[in-house]
Image (cartoon, helix red, strand yellow):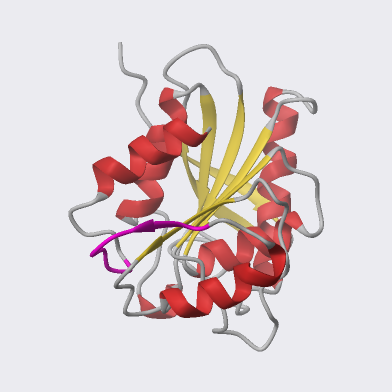
Amino acid sequence: MLKQPEKITIAGPVGALETIVVPPQSDMVGIAVICHPNPTQGGTNTNKVVQTTAKALSQLGYHCYCPNLRGVGESEGTHDYGNGEVDDVIAVVEHARREHGAEAPLVLAGFSFGGFVAARTRARIEADKLLLMGVAVGKYVIPTPHVPADTLVIHGEEDEVIPLSAVLDWARPQGLPVVVFPGTSHFFHGKLVPLAQMIQRCL
């Protein structure tokens, strides 16, 4: 029987974090925290790419947490352009580890602005896998950090928000492969099923 998502509140560094939890659809293999796109442009934890990622990972056995980061939805605090949001993600990771075990494998994931936040979070804490979709490279004063060699980077060829060329310029010095979806825009319109399949295949 399909296990349904639930909404919970997690204590964050500047107040409550409204969070959607998507439980594993099989025996739990780990935890995942998935970060939403830019809230100044309407990004929240209900974004289709975020929810597609959570469902794909839950089918693999991950207990998925999709927080609204500070200042978004019913989460307290003020949007901090990817700075304080890293502390929010770490708070969600710590909550998940208290719930499911400190040794549970961790996936950090994010879409667009959320990819920028996930990459910055990975620079501060250990994770078993980093998953970045449409990652917001070159959009903020603080540069997107280098990431582990096994990071899964997925980008649309025709991304109108974050040009593919910017991502390739960021990835090239790292020798980092990028999975390109031909003819695909920033929001992976019409490509959510193949996106989920790619995530599952690579994890």
Quick check: 72 left or right of 104? left
Instruction: Pick whichever, 137 or 74, lies toward us.
Output: 137
User: Residue 14: in sight, yes or no?
Assistant: no
Residue 197 drawn at (x, y percent): 34, 35
> What is the quadrant of the N terminus in the image?
top left
Instruction: Pick whichever, 133 or 51, lies toward us.
Output: 133
Q: In the rendered view, tell whether residue 129 sits above or below residue 135.
A: above
Q: In the rendered view, tell whether residue 132 sits above or below residue 200.
A: below
Residue shown at the point (71%, 37%) measured from the top left: 128
Residue shown at the point (72%, 50%) measured from the top left: 91
Residue 94 sits in which quadrant?
top right
Residue shown at the point (43%, 32%) measured from the top left: 200
Residue 116 among those drawn in magenta: no
Residue 188 drawn at (x, y percent): 28, 59
Quick check: 12 left or right of 109? right
Residue 13 sits in which quadrant?
bottom right
